[in-house]
Amino acid sequence: MTRVLEGIRVLDFGRVIASAYCGTLLADMGADVIKVERPGGEFDRKLGPFTPSGKAIVYELITPRNKKSITLNTRHPKGQEILDELIEDTSIIITGFTRKGNQLMGLDYERLKQINPGIILVAISGYGQTGPGADRPSFDAIAQAESGAMSYTGFPGSPPTRAAVPFVDFSTATMGAYGAMLALLHKERTGKGQLVDVSLLDTAFTFVAGMGVVAEYTLLNQIRPQVGNHSFHNYSDGFEAKDGWVMISVIGNEIWQRFIGAIGRADLLEDDRFSDDQSRYQNRDLIRPIVNKWVGKHTVSEVVRLLEQKRVPCGRVNTVRELVNDPHLIAREMLIKRQYPGVGEVPVPGIPVKLSRTPGKIETDACRLGEHNQEIYCQLLSYTQEDLESLRLEGVI
């Protein structure tokens, strides 16, 4: 079945997660994504975790899937010439550098559009392509910190806490792919390309401000506190059962009524301290021992079964041991096992966006460094085998 982005060529200069995973999202949907690395490979190939044979699981097995790999030194004069040839017949370029880094690589938008006016540059960086921080480097953890997210993550009294999942990286990748699709639609209508400027800090701040944290401070002079596993302005928390932990979210009066019925405490309906979401949030410490006592009498499976019968949102706090056997994830094809030469069977994430007519597909496993040099340079750009050997000796590819 045809994938929706077939025929769209992408040059992927992505590094680490945000920019690299942006390219993966496009490749999964059929784009012809060419991963471009310097000769010898990029530094992220040395970032763990590693397979027993020494392969970087994230950066050599997962994010390069469905891509082709070439090596190219764009700072070499001949490398720049080759880059310009590639740009002429490319729809999208993805970069993961600062503004200055893009300029040094010959990948700034002003230069690119002179070569190909229809080019779309998805520039993913820590702080964006404008503003006083545009030349500062950054990673997910820094964006979590500077966005304010870390200040209210964790339990009361704990140090500012980073989310273990690099949500800023993966969300910024998604923002980049979303921006690329908007730019493609605009190009289809007008024939003109454009710069898609996406940053880690913008993404993280969008999530923080989107939850009302900034407005809460500005309008009410309230600084959001650390509340552990509680939710803000409603009642949610994690509880320890006989054999593990369970997360319960009780949002809205209808679910609250069903919940207290499930735990046998219908008397709480008459208590004004728990009359709505805000009051339950404010009096969360009074509710916790009541729920703790009920949950502690049951196993996790029993808690989930009893609450699901009342349609109360809840779930086991899974460790990776439970996760790899989750029947729902398997049914949704989100946990896929692939065979990698020299590594063996590796579980990898599936494709989260399910399209009914043009679904994505993991068609090829992760590309090896420079695996497609001959295909791209000889077939696409008409270089000879002798040309390639000469470029290798000169350190261009």
Image (spheres, grey):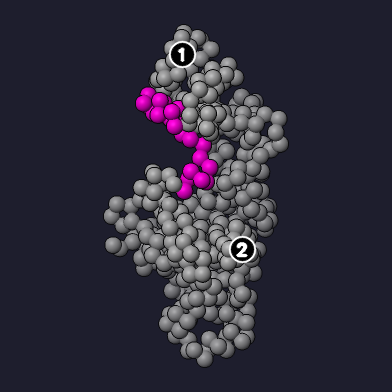
Left or right: 166 in relation to 345: right
Q: Which residue is mark 1?
A: 265
Real-space Cα distance between discs 1 and 2?
A: 54 Å
Left or right: 183 in relation to 232: left
Give x and y (percent) for residue 298.
Answer: 48, 25
Task: Report helix, strand or loop for mark 2.
Answer: helix
Left or right: 67 in relation to 397: left
> Is the residue 28 above or below the residue 300 in the image?
below
Residue drawn at (37%, 60%), measured in percent from left and top? 361
Q: Amino acid at mark 1?
A: Arg
Residue drawn at (48%, 64%), measured in percent from left and top? 344
> Foreground: 169 or 183?
169
Which of label 1 and label 2 is nearer to you? 1
Give x and y (percent) for residue 325.
Answer: 44, 46
Quick one: label 1, few (<14), some, or many (20+) residues within 10 Å? some
- The label number, if any, that marks residue 44 in the structure image: 2
Marks 1 and 2, the one that precedes in the sequence: 2
- Range shown magenta: 301-324
Q: Amino acid at mark 2?
A: Asp
| Quarter that holds the N terminus | bottom left
